[in-house]
Image: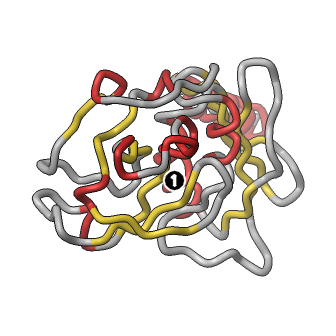
Amino acid sequence: MNEKIPYGPEDCVRTGYDMFIAGYVAVIKPEALPEHQHGVRQLLFCDGGAGSFPHAADSTVRAVSLSNGECLSKKRNEILGLLKPELIPDRARLQLSQIRPLDSEVPKEPEFFGYCFLPDGRYASGVPLADDLEVREYIDIQSRYQHRLMVCDREDFCVFEMREGRCIFPAREMPDAQQKEQRDADIEIKL
């Protein structure tokens, strides 16, 4: 996806102050930035702050720039709205893929790694995830915006895969099939 310059209200799913914005990609109002900083520099991932709550126009939002990964603070009244997921440019998607679950620290010995892929197969390095809870939060953040999402365990075995918003692995039928195989194996052993 190519970058648009500048992003405006027509590019947003929602605009205004009546929504919760933490965990979403938001657009900074064009007038809140110098003209040479429009486009991907208008995009940020909101990760909290008092300004992320509805009707908090004068409060501050904590965010990560999707142009360079820098942590920054913006006033809620500088935020135009939530960007339509299909309008995020590729380089912003790759930057977004590196964002860890909100308010978590990088684990010293991660149990899992999260990967996000563009449609052409490009991806950034794996994101270390400490436990099942961080995996769920990473999936929740990324699944709205990424073409393909994969979580691997410490031994690099895939434990979860999603493409275009649909869970590919594990398949819903798998637990039942595995249970049937286990029951059949138990029957054979007992005979």
* Of residues 100 and 51, the one drawn nearer to the viewer in this rendering: 51
Is residue 180 visible in the rendered image? The answer is no
Looking at the picture, how far across and down is residue 30, in whole percent?
38, 41
Residue at coordinates 76% horizontally, 34% vertically from top-left? 191
Q: On the rendered structure, is 158 left or right of 9?
A: right
Q: In this view, does 72 lie above or below 31?
A: below
Q: Which colour scheme is used?
A: secondary structure
Give the image quarter of residue 184: top right
Q: Residue at the far front: name it.
A: 35
Give the image quarter of residue 83: top left
Mark 1 lies on residue: 136
Residue at coordinates 18% horizontally, 69% vertically from top-left? 58
Give the image quarter of residue 162: top right
Looking at the picture, how far across and down is residue 145, in whole percent?
52, 33
Q: In this view, does 159 lie above or below 5?
A: below
Looking at the picture, how far across and down is residue 105, in whole percent?
61, 78
Looking at the picture, how far across and down is residue 107, in whole percent?
71, 77
* Of residues 190 and 28, the one drawn nearer to the viewer in this rendering: 28
Q: Residue at the far right: name it.
A: 155
* Of residues 127 and 187, the one drawn nearer to the viewer in this rendering: 127
